[in-house]
Image (cartoon, rainbow, N blue to C red):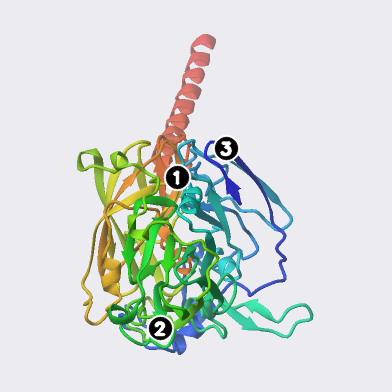
Amino acid sequence: MRVKPGQSLSIKLTNNLDYNLGPNPPTAADYWKMLQNAGEHIKYQRYKRRAPDPSHMKVDHANMPHGFQTTNLHLHGLDVEVHMFDPVGTHNPDAPHIAIQPGECYCYNFNVPDHHPGGMYWYHPHVHGATAIQMWSGMIGLLYVDGPLEAELQEYGIKNTQEFVIWDPAFRSVDEKNHNLEVDEFLLGQTTLSKIHPFLVNGKQTPNFQVGMGEALHLRSLCATIENENTFIVYPEGMEHNSWKESAIPFWVIASDGVTFRKPRKKIIMVMSGGQRDEILLQFDEPGRYVISQQGIQGMQFFDMRGHPHDQILATITVSESSDGSKPIVPISEMEFTPGYSEEESIKAEDIAGSETIVFSMGADFDKSPFPQYYVNGQSFDPNKINFHAKPGEAREYTLINANHNAHPFHIHVNRFQVKEVGSELSTEVYPVLESVLDFDPDIWRDTFMVPPNGRTRIWVQYKNYTGKTVLHCHFLAHEDTGMMATLFIGEQDWVFRAKDHIQWIIGCMIGTVFSSVGLILHVRREKKRVYS
């Protein structure tokens, strides 16, 4: 999908999902059964004893995985109208999620600003309770906003542009007439215990890319993982078991989350969280085979569980001695591009209108489903409660706290931010890949960023002029589906009368009405007696 700045984008989304396809949503009994033999050892406190049977499980119904055949649309990273709740752009604080049932359709209309940064974006479903299962099944797509980057790369002699979409499906083998793969049960996907759980690139396992010696390979990379982080490291084939500090091939990043940099940034390792996009330039001086490796996340991502996610080769690159002549006319390090945002648009300390803390945490109540429980500021998601407020056009500071030893990519809808501080209590000697997470650039604009385990990230958010009800959440989507999301309201809310908020006033009015009625009746009776007497 492509759109130009200043254009309107109209999308008709039709839900053709079949009620009979895919797994059933997990029940409290499913969680109870899983907890009797939880499998891999997890280093967190059991706050309560196990329930003796499923009937004793406490159920947070709003945050149970559900509605797997209901869908909707989220344009990830675009500066457009808020569109999580019905209708698009709603100012009703009680508005429900847009939820398109099988056989139904919904029309979205967006206005892309004239000054929108050109770059790589994407879209996916975002129905609370069903987001993870639908994205494990492959419901994702790319969206590009046209800008000057592609033409500028051509002018520099860079013509080999390829998409590089990383995805972590959770599949199981089946023996059906028309297919042999299905998305696996939610609980197995969430715990990485699915039967088939490789990382795929562009829908393939270990695809090969080809480039000539001295040419530049431009990879438009999207980390579309649902429940995993990912590293991007390039090695000569056979050297991927060495330290990346010793053997990795350098590469250059020229854009992140749809925003182009003025100058390329040189790296030898990059950690990508679900939702992040990075535009990468690679150049090889020697022919041969190279690999792009995912490695080193083990242990850091989730409570020191080694093998989660597994190290693997994402893709291979064949570098040939021959070239079609399209070599860069200047060294990559000397290239300059039209930036998505100017330096003058960076947020300044004096612009900050207020500061808040957002805590991502996890509960481990064995008598409660879903399990584990995921919270923002100690509360699971409640669509009927507004958690955060902002004004259009203002800048706000948020200190993001990760209270546990597991990773949480932070994403805020239709607004960007700049990262100002990153830290973690974990050791970079024990988890060397963490060093890359802590190596941030305060000038880069992002819409998704990983809050490191047992760590913090301080960000400055610049709110646009779009107003209404939207959300912020963890972009590990099984976490979001089971509670790690909060509502955000930008601008003024519509006034909505809620009887539950005015119980005392209603009771007072009713009592007053009763007393007034009784008084009126007594007065009428006295008047009648006076007249007849």
Task: Left or right? Give the position of 254 relative to 170.
Answer: left
Mark 2 falls on what kind of element?
loop
Question: Which image quadrant is residue 67 in?
Answer: bottom right
Q: Position of residue 230 (x, y in %)?
A: 42, 73
Could you give the CA–CA distance between mark 3 and mark 1, rounded to whole angstroms? 13 Å
Instruction: Compare marks 2 and 3 and give the one earlier in the sequence.
Output: 3
Q: Is residue 155 visible?
A: yes
Secondary structure state at the residue bearing disc 3 = loop
| Residue labelled with disc 2 | 50
User: How would you rate the neighbour count of disc 2 (Cα within 10 Å): few for under 14, some for 14-19, many for 20 or more?
Assistant: some
Q: CA distance from mark 2 to mark 3?
A: 56 Å
User: Which mark identifies residue 493?
Assistant: none
Above or below, comparing residue 137 to residue 41 in the picture = above
Helix, strand or loop for disc 1 = loop
Q: Residue at x 59, y 49 (%)?
A: 2
**Which residue is denoted by mark 3 in the rendering?**
7
Q: Position of residue 172 (x, y in %)?
A: 62, 82
Q: Amino acid at mark 2?
A: Arg
Q: Nearer the viewer, mark 2 or mark 1?
A: 1
State the residue in front, 73 or 259.
259
Q: CA distance from mark 2 to mark 1?
A: 51 Å
Callout 2–callout 1 Cβ contact below 8 Å: no
Inspect this view and state whether residue 169 appears: no
Q: Residues within 10 Å of mark 3 (few under 14, many from 20)?
A: few
- Going 44% across and 59% down the picture, which residue do you hit? 328
| Direction right: furthest residue | 177
Question: At which x and y percent is residue 398?
Answer: 28, 52
Q: Characterize the local packing of mark 1: few (<14), some (14-19) or many (20 or more) Cα atoms within 10 angstroms.
A: many
Residue position for label 1:
117
Given residues 271 and 118, the one toward you in this image is: 118
Q: Is residue 517 left or right of residue 66?
A: left
Of residues 497 and 158, the one nearer the viewer is 158
